[in-house]
Amino acid sequence: MANKHPYRFCFGPWNISEGQDPYGPTTRPVQSFDWKLAQLKKHGFEAMMFHDDDAVPEIDSKPESQIRKEAKELKKRLNGLGIAAEMVAPRLWFAPQTIDGAYTSNDPKCRRYAIERSLRSIDLANILGTDILVLWLAREGSYIRESKDAGRCLDYLVEALDQMLAHDKRIRLAIEPKPNEPMDHAYLPTIGHALAVASLTRDSKRVGCLIESAHAILAGLDPADEIDFAMKFGKLWSLHLNDQNGLKYDQDRPFGNVSLRSAFDQVRVLERTGYGTNGEYVCFDVHPFRTTKPEHWMDHLLNSRRTFLRLVEKVRSFDEKAAQKLAADRDYQALDQMVIDHLLGR
Ligand code: XUL
Ligand code: MN
């Protein structure tokens, strides 16, 4: 295995969530952003991910000058702590204007809102010193098939991406596909869809993707193969590692805690393809269990990183030559067991 670079880790303020779900309120006291940033620093993570309103709260109600001022203050604080901003993502799924979709809303005023908010997020990314805008296309899809024209919605999406690319010549757009939730069907459910849409834009080189393990599993796909696919195109610019128990709601479980083998396969591909060598971070989009007590609030993040690092060791000590020989002999039974024995420590 050639790739021996150290990995750098990252998470977002929403990953220290307070326990609310669609059926019940918070189960831990609400914590400030400052506390979350201090936790990130204390536990040795190198970067933070930001929704636009994580960086500047209540961003929609503030004038441009105020947004810039607050963003600059945040950047100063991050610099002081030696923490990078990994990305900025417009939170396009909360506002009343995005009830029926953002870039693909049937209402042109709402589509305009989504684009303007995205352009402002690009300005924020500039101030925070990142060239990555993440687009989780939460409401770009349908509940009622007949309510939208999927072909026209693709045109709207490309139009929106083109405006973002034109707004800033250096920004890179990382599409984070997810097949469902909150929508019944998303228009860009997989990495293949995201990269195909990239080719329709005015500068396809600057449209790439972010893979989240759970989202791939929800699409019935193998996250390791999705990673391999995106890396082949040189388009994997960020990564949300986590885990997911089958085709249910999005669970954002700690990395490797449902399928250790799948986690091993993901790390193996990251190692083989050199993820991280161009400065990409390993982000954990994981949530504490609702039952988690405040004193264990960081454990899901620390456990994800610990599992990741232990799997890096497992990958580096995996006898690839022996594995190749078994594959060449078509002895897949032995190869299968070799992986299990290796993970079990024999
Ligand atoms: C949603 C999801 C988001 C994005 C960031 O499922 O993963 O947290 O990662 O907007
Ligand atoms: Mn995510």
Image (cartoon, rainbow, N blue to C red):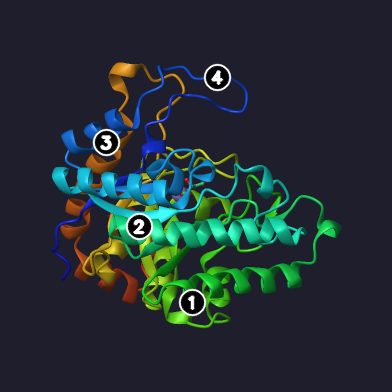
- Please give the name of the residue rendered at 16% of the width and 40% of the height, measured from the top-left corner: 44
Q: Earlier in the sequence, mark 1 or mark 4?
A: 4
Residue 340 lies left or right of residue 197; in this view the side is left
The residue that mark 4 highlights is 25
Give the answer, above or below, for where 115 lies relative to 97: below
Q: How many marks?
A: 4
The residue that mark 3 highlights is 37
* Residue mark closest to the camera, 2 vs 1: 1
The residue that mark 2 highlights is 266
What numbered label is drawn on residue 166? 1
Q: Amino acid at mark 4?
A: Pro
Are discs 4 and 2 less than 8 Å apart at CB? no
Residue 99 lies left or right of residue 41; in this view the side is right
Which of these two is toward me, 318 or 97? 97
How many angstroms separate mark 2 from mark 1 (CA)? 34 Å
Q: Amino acid at mark 2?
A: Gln
